[in-house]
Image (tube, helix red, strand yellow):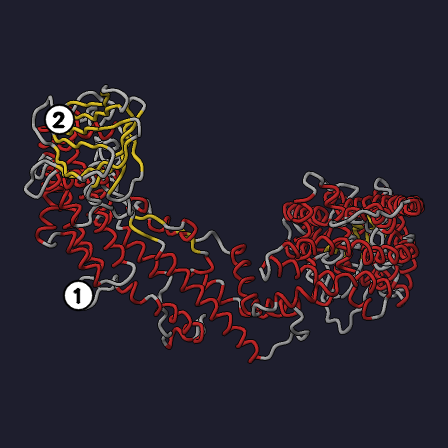
């Protein structure tokens, strides 16, 4: 039943049913028991309820009682009917839309029908039936009277609990479609059942032919004549009503929108027309600028009104002239006329102003530089649309405007918009080709400078230009550069120093990742760059390349790339040097990093290996999916071969240790060597002993072994090991020298300050003399200074250890100078037998006329002189060891016998007296000394050995001893 209900009305959502024809076997219904009838009626009621609830529309119900022929007397009463009479309708059609009238109408029909039967019965008994059929006529009439009550009860039960607005009872009809040749008398059966009598048998007969009674016209005149009587589906009705409301509202809204839009576009076009007139008037009143315009900003007063007027209607290039603005669009009538003037100003005013600024930058750019090519590239794209790249031009000019007009966003936007329109629509080159006088005149100032720039920039091959440009573009596309310091890690600063910080950054373009993921994928881009720069430099106008041309371009640029790649990594590795250690603990810390987990030397080499690794030929399985061509693989392996030696130290062959592992072991020995010095009770003395042992044994220590190993290793590891050993030796030597400082102060400096400093001859103004014994003990061979030098400093001086690895002196330069000065004093004041003394000769040269005689007494050595020839006399110092010895010069006057002179006393009296005179005529081995006494003068000439001159200036006066040695 559910299935049948679902199928009923399928596809007819609006009116799923035209009606329900309910046929009931009235004979069987009446003969059924009361319980059976109630069950039957309940079933029918449920089915009708399901149909009504499922279809949700008002359905006509046609009730048809069939099997009328089974009632006793049917054959007798209707046997004489003609065909037309049999086709008539036997039943009642209830009044439409009057749910309460069916009972009255049913009763009236039944009454009229029974009345007609009864009225016709007398005639039928006399004329139409046999004598044995007469009783059946009466019986049939009585049965039909009894049927009325069943019919009424049936209808009431069927309509119970069903909404009257959902089910329309349309009529009740009686039919007999076929005859079975049998019948029953309801009254007899009922009475027999009531009194428990046996059933009366009724005759049956064979029917050869059956005919329908009251059926044909029922279908044509009633059932099929009311197809639209059924109501519409309520859900459909609600949905249709809602749709109608929506569609109606939408139509109304659309109508309002159409009217509003039409009005809006009408007003917009009207206002745009007014704006065009306003801008045109403003344009006519503008005076052209006469100033120098390098950025195009001085042309804005002319261009802005035209642009606003042209776009008052919007860009007509993007509009359909027939449907735009509901057909009201006027841009096609106004825009083209304004655009002609606008494009002419762009071509003859705006673009030349921009070109002037670009040529200013072009002339200021370095000759033959990439910067100059970049500017020329923009210039060519502006003046020739055949190779124009709008995005490149706009981006360059946007940066230029941004730098010039900072904070003026509106001005920059205006300049950008005008240039963008010019790049899209101005065809400057084509206008010149067509002989446009304005275009030719505007371009004439730039024709020669462009050719000169092209000639200059063509000196560098186009392949080098393209490669430079490719490298610049790669820096914008690829991630940050590879930093060797970052790759090595935190231990970098403990061991390495970069000679040039910039070389620590390797462009990503020149790494293995950049090679595989960028450069090798630039084949088409290389052709594009070559084509563009060839066009810029006017090398060729043909931008189509054959396969051979493409291969040559790739080969040339690949050669440049390989050369740049190799030189960059060689330079990066050569840029790393071992840092200078300030002391032994710092050197120990650095070695601990090298031989420990950090291993900065190994990491540096691994970074080099990773970025110069080769590529094996693909296997048969890999061949189908290989992304690197054979030629590209050859280039990769070519780079790898350039660094095979450098990275070979990482290779382990035949289960043998790699060179880097062997070097690490040697550095471990060096680390223990330094620890032994550092952990000794006196690191300075231990370092001094280590220096002496190494120099005396000619090597054979961990430093020497590392240096020897470094000679057998390739760059850069060999250089790093040698530098590391040198730096370690440097700190050991420095530590040794530092330890001597205490002894230097105790033995040398303290004695100098106590006995020599501040006394004559070290201080000429001092009245105190340095005792000869102290002078002798301090300066003599084997004395204080000489002993310290021989025992401690000689090993450094003779083995050229006075400078560290940084070429800075390990011993103070003033200390070294004073040691040389001490050696000169020793050589001058001590004879080969180590005795203290000097020799020199003195000769009278001249005496003033007012003096008649002079006497020079030098420690008891006399030299007399009267006017005439003087004699050269040899003198010695000291001539006596007495402390109170005197040296004096005496002059005697010619007019009287008075004597005047100059005298000095003490062990240093000779030198003091010579210092008291005025020196002149100084040569390498002679000098004159003049004494002025009592209005006269006397001049002597002193002869000395030029190599050992005890009177040399600064020999004592500039003598100082520093308290520090380093």
Residue 683 visible (yes or no): no
Q: Percent x, y for residue 27?
A: 72, 55
103 or 901: nearer the viewer: 901
Residue at point 52%, 60% (across, down)? 471
Residue at point 72%, 47% (across, down)? 52
Q: Earlier in the sequence, mark 1 or mark 2?
A: 1
Label 1 SS: loop
Q: Percent x, y for residue 200?
A: 68, 57
Q: Are marks 1 and 2 in contact (CB under 8 Å)?
A: no
Residue at point 16%, 50% (across, down)? 799
Within 10 Å of the Cα at label 2, are there few (<14), some (14-19), or many (20+) other Cα atoms? many
User: Where is residue 942, by image quadrant?
Assistant: top left
Q: Percent x, y for residue 949?
A: 20, 40
Residue under pointer 2: 907
Q: How many marks?
A: 2
Label 2 SS: loop
Disc assigned to residue 655? 1
Measured Cα–Cα span from mark 1 to mark 2:
82 Å
797 or 552: nearer the viewer: 797
945 or 643: nearer the viewer: 945
Disc assigned to residue 910? none
529 vs 60: above or below: below
| Residue 366 left/right relative to 435 | left
Q: Percent x, y for residue 261?
A: 88, 46
873 vs 31: above or below: above
Q: Split into 4 quadrants, where in the image is the N terminus? A: bottom right
Q: Residue furthest left?
A: 833
Residue 695 visible (yes or no): yes
């Amino acid at each position: 039943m559910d299935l049948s209900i679902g199928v009923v009305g399928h596809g007819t959502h609006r009116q799923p049913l035209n009606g329900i024809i309910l046929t009931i076997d009235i004979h069987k219904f009446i003969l059924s028991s009361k319980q059976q009838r109630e069950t039957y009626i309940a079933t029918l009621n449920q089915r009708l309820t399901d149909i009504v609830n499922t279809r949700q529309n008002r359905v006509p119900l046609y009730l048809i009682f069939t099997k009328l022929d089974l009632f006793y007397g049917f054959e007798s009463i209707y046997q004489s009917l003609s065909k037309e009479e049999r086709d008539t309708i036997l039943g009642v059609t209830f009044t439409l839309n009057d749910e309460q009238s069916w009972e009255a109408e049913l009763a009236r029909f039944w009454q009229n029908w029974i009345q007609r039967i009864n009225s016709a019965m007398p005639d039928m008994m006399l004329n139409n039936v046999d004598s044995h059929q007469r009783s059946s006529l009466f019986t049939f009439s009585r049965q039909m009277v009894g049927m009325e009550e069943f019919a009424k009860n049936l209808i009431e039960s069927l309509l119970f609990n069903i909404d009257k607005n959902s089910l329309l009872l349309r009529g009740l009809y009686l039919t007999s479609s076929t005859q079975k040749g049998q019948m029953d008398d309801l009254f007899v059966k009922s009475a027999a059942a009531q009194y428990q009598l046996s059933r009366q048998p009724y005759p049956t007969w064979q029917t050869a032919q059956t005919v329908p009674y009251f059926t044909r016209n029922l279908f044509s005149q009633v059932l099929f004549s009311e197809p639209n009587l059924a109501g519409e589906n309520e859900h459909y009705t609600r949905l249709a009503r809602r749709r109608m409301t929506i569609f109606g509202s939408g139509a109304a809204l659309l109508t309002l929108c159409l009217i509003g839009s039409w009005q809006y576009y009408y007003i917009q076009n009207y206002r745009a027309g007014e704006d065009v007139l306003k801008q045109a008037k403003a344009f006519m009143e503008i005076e052209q600028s006469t100033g120098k315009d390098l950025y195009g900003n001085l042309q804005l007063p002319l261009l802005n009104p035209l642009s606003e007027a042209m776009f008052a209607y919007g860009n007509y290039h993007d509009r359909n002239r027939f449907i735009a603005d509901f057909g009201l669009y006027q841009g096609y009538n106004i825009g083209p006329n304004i655009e002609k003037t606008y494009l002419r100003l762009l071509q003859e005013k705006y673009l030349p102003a921009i070109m002037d600024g670009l040529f200013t930058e072009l002339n200021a750019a370095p000759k033959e530089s990439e910067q100059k090519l970049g500017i020329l590239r923009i210039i060519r794209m502006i003046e020739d649309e055949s190779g124009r790249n709008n995005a490149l031009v706009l981006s360059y000019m946007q940066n230029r405007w941004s730098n010039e007009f900072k904070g003026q966003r509106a001005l920059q936007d205006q300049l950008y918009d005008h240039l963008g329109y010019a790049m899209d629509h101005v065809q400057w080159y084509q206008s010149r080709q067509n002989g446009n006088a304005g275009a030719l005149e505007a371009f004439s100032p730039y024709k020669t400078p462009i050719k000169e720039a092209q000639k200059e920039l063509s000196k560098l091959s186009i392949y080098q230009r393209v490669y430079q440009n490719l490298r610049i573009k790669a820096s914008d596309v690829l991630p940050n550069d590879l930093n060797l310091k970052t790759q090595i890690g935190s231990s970098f600063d403990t061991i390495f120093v970069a000679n040039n910080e910039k070389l620590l950054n390797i462009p990503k373009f020149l790494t293995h990742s950049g090679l595989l993921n960028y450069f090798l994928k630039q084949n088409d881009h290389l052709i594009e760059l070559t084509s563009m720069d060839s066009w810029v430099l006017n090398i060729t106008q043909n931008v189509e390349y054959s396969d051979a041309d493409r291969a040559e371009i790739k080969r040339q640029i690949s050669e440049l790339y390989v050369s740049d790649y190799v030189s960059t990594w060689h330079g990066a590795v050569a840029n790393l040097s071992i840092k200078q250690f300030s002391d032994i603990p710092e050197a120990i810390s650095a070695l601990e990093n090298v031989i420990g987990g950090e291993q900065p030397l190994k990491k540096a080499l691994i970074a080099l290996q990773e970025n110069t690794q080769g590529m094996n030929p693909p296997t048969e399985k890999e061949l189908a999916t290989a992304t690197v061509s054979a030629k590209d693989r050859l280039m990769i392996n070519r780079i790898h071969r350039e660094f095979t030696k450098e990275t070979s130290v990482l290779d382990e062959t035949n289960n043998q240790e790699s060179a880097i592992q062997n070097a690490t072991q040697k550095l471990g020995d060096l680390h223990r060597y330094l620890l032994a010095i550092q952990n000794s009770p006196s690191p300075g003395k231990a370092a001094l002993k280590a220096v002496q042992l190494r120099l005396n044994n000619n090597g054979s220590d961990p430093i020497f072994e590392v240096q020897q190993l470094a000679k057998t290793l390739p760059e850069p590891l060999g250089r790093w090991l040698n530098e590391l050993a040198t730096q370690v030796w440097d700190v050991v030597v420095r530590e040794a020298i530092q330890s001597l400082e205490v002894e230097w102060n105790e033995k040398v400096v303290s004695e100098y300050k106590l006995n020599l400093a501040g006394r004559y001859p070290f201080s000429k103004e001092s009245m105190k003399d340095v005792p000869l014994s102290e002078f002798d003990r301090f300066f003599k061979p084997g004395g204080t200074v000489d002993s310290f030098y021989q025992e401690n400093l000689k090993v450094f001086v003779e083995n050229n250890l006075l400078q560290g690895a940084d070429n800075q002196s390990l011993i103070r330069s003033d200390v070294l100078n004073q040691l040389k000065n001490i050696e000169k004093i020793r050589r001058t004041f001590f004879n080969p037998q180590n005795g203290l003394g000097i020799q020199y000769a003195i000769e009278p040269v001249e005496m003033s006329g007012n003096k008649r005689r002079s006497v020079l007494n030098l420690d008891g050595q006399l030299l007399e002189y009267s006017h005439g020839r003087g004699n050269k006399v040899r003198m010695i110092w000291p001539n006596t060891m007495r402390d109170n010895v005197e040296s004096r010069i005496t002059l005697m006057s010619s007019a009287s016998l008075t004597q005047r002179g100059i005298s000095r006393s003490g062990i240093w009296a000779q030198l003091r007296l010579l210092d008291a005179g005025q020196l002149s005529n100084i040569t390498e081995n002679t000098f004159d000394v003049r004494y002025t006494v009592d209005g006269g003068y006397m001049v002597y000439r002193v002869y000395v050995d030029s190599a050992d001159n005890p009177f040399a200036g600064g020999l004592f006066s500039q003598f100082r001893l520093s308290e520090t040695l380093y």
